[in-house]
Image (cartoon, rainbow, N blue to C red):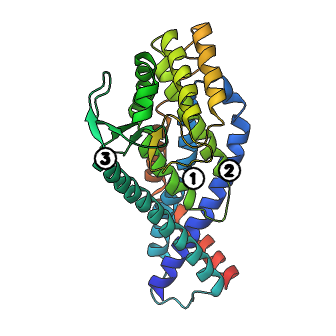
C-alpha cells in the first residue's frame, strides 16, 4: 500500500500543479499579449514557447524535488492510509494524460518518418543554393514546400512549386524555411504537442499554441526578409502564388514539419501585409527593450536552479508532507 499510495499521490500532485500552472500561464499571456505586439515575431514566439513548456516543467520539478522526497522521508512504510476512489480517479486521469502525451509525441514522430519515407520513394534529389540539408523534388497535388523532420530534416518541394516560382521567389521561400531550421521549430512543435496533451480536459493552452504557430511563421518571414526589401517582396509574391495553388477543400498530410503554406491559408494575408510593410519601411526588426530569444533555455535553467534550491530543505519537506496528509484525509 505504501508504494501504491505514493504513486497515486505523485500523479495526483502532478495533475493539480499542472492545472494551476496552466491557469496562471493562460492568465499571464492575456495580460502580456497586447504588450508583445510591438516585439519581433521571433521574440514573441520564444516567449510563447517558454510559457507553454513552463507549466509541465514546474510541475515535474515540484513533484520530483518536493513531493517525492517528502513522502519518502516522512511517510511511514507501515502506513494505515489507503487509496480512496477520489484519489485513484485523479491519479488515473493524470496517468492517462501523461501516457497520451507520450503516445501523441511518438505517433507524430512515427507519422513523420513514414511520410518522409513515402515521399522519398517518389522524390528526386536536387541541389538548390543557400540550403545545406538534403532537398528533394516530389510530385504532389498540394503545393508543398516544407522542412520535414527534427534531428535529420529534409526539404521537400512539389513539382508545381518549382515550375511556378521564379528564381528570386524560390530563393526567398527557401530563406523562410532556413528561418525554421535555425530556430529548431520542428522540435519545438513536438514538445508543444506533448505539453498540450498533458491536460486533456482543459483548453488553457490552445490559444497559446495557435499564437505560437502564427508567430513562428511570421518569424521565419522576418528571417528571410532581413537581407533586404527585395527578398521581402519576393517572399510575399511566393506566398500569394502558392496560396493560389492550394486546391479548394484540399488538406495536405501534415507531419511535424515547417510548411511555407499549409492547408490553412487564412493567415497568408496578414503575412503578406507584414512583408510589404517591412519592404516599404526597411524595418526588419522592431526595437525591443531586452533580448528574449534565449528565454526557453533561461526558463529551463531557472526551473533547475529553483529545484536545486528547494531540494533537501527539511522544514519545507515536512510542510509538504503535512499538506499531503491533509489532502489524503480530504479525499478519503
Look at the picture and state if 6 lies above or below 80.
above
Image-based side of 289 in relation to 100, left or right = right
Look at the picture and state if 135 lies above or below 90.
above
Q: Secondary structure at mark 1?
A: helix
* Residue at x 53% of width, y 42% of height: 50
Badge nearest the viewer, 2 or 3:
3
Marks 2 and 3, how far apart at CA: 48 Å
The percent position of residue 217, horizontal first and vertical second, equals 54, 33
Among the 4 quarters of the image, the one containing residue 44:
top right
* Residue at x 40% of width, y 18% of height: 167
Q: Secondary structure at mark 2?
A: helix
Marks 1 and 2, how far apart at CA: 9 Å
* Residue at x 41% of width, y 45% of height: 187
Q: Which residue is mark 2?
A: 24
Which badge, 1 or 2, is on the more N-terminal residue?
2
Q: Which residue is mark 3?
A: 122
Q: Nearer the viewer, residue 204 or 237?
A: 237
Q: Secondary structure at mark 3?
A: helix
* Residue at x 65% of width, y 21% of height: 273
Which badge, 3 or 1, is on the more N-terminal residue?
1
The percent position of residue 240, horizontal first and vertical second, equals 58, 26
Q: Which residue is mark 1?
A: 55
Residue, far top:
281
The percent position of residue 191, horizontal first and vertical second, equals 47, 51
CB within 8 Å, label 1 to label 2 = yes
Q: Nearer the viewer, residue 284 or 2?
A: 284
Would residue 43 be visible to someone looking at this image? no
Look at the picture and state if 89 lies above or below 315.
below
Badge nearest the viewer, 3 or 1:
3
Marks 3 and 1, how far apart at CA: 42 Å
Image-based side of 326 in relation to 62, left or right = right
Amino acid at each position: 500500500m505504501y508504494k501504491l499510495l505514493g504513486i497515486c499521490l505523485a500523479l495526483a500532485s502532478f495533475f493539480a500543479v499542472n492545472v494551476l500552472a496552466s491557469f496562471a500561464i493562460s492568465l499571464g499571456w492575456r495580460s502580456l499579449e497586447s504588450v508583445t505586439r510591438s516585439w519581433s515575431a521571433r521574440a514573441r514566439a520564444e516567449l510563447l514557447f517558454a510559457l507553454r513548456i513552463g507549466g509541465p516543467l514546474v510541475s515535474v520539478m515540484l513533484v520530483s524535488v518536493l513531493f517525492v522526497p517528502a513522502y519518502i522521508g516522512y511517510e511511514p512504510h507501515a502506513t494505515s492510509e489507503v487509496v480512496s476512489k477520489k484519489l485513484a480517479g485523479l491519479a488515473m486521469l493524470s496517468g492517462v494524460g501523461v501516457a497520451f502525451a507520450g503516445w501523441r509525441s511518438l505517433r507524430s514522430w512515427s507519422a513523420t518518418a513514414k511520410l518522409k519515407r513515402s515521399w522519398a520513394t517518389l522524390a528526386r534529389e536536387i541541389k538548390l543554393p543557400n540550403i545545406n540539408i538534403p532537398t528533394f523534388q516530389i510530385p504532389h497535388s498540394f503545393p508543398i514546400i516544407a522542412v520535414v523532420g527534427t534531428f535529420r530534416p529534409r526539404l521537400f518541394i512539389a513539382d508545381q512549386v518549382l515550375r511556378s516560382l521564379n528564381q528570386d521567389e524560390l530563393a526567398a521561400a527557401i530563406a523562410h524555411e532556413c528561418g525554421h531550421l535555425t530556430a529548431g521549430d520542428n522540435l519545438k512543435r513536438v514538445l508543444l504537442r506533448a505539453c498540450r496533451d498533458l491536460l486533456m480536459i482543459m483548453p488553457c493552452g490552445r490559444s497559446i499554441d495557435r499564437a505560437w504557430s502564427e508567430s513562428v511563421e511570421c518569424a521565419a518571414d522576418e528571417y528571410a526578409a532581413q537581407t533586404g526589401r527585395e527578398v521581402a517582396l519576393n517572399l510575399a509574391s511566393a506566398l500569394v502564388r502558392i496560396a493560389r495553388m492550394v486546391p479548394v477543400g484540399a488538406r495536405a498530410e501534415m507531419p511535424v514539419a515547417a510548411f511555407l503554406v499549409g492547408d490553412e491559408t487564412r493567415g497568408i494575408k496578414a503575412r503578406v501585409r507584414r512583408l510589404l510593410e517591412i519592404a516599404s519601411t526597411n524595418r526588419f526588426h522592431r526595437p525591443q527593450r531586452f533580448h528574449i530569444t534565449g528565454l526557453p533555455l533561461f526558463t529551463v535553467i531557472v526551473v533547475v536552479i529553483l529545484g536545486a534550491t528547494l531540494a533537501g530543505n527539511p522544514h519545507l519537506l515536512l510542510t509538504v508532507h503535512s499538506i499531503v496528509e491533509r489532502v489524503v484525509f480530504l479525499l478519503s
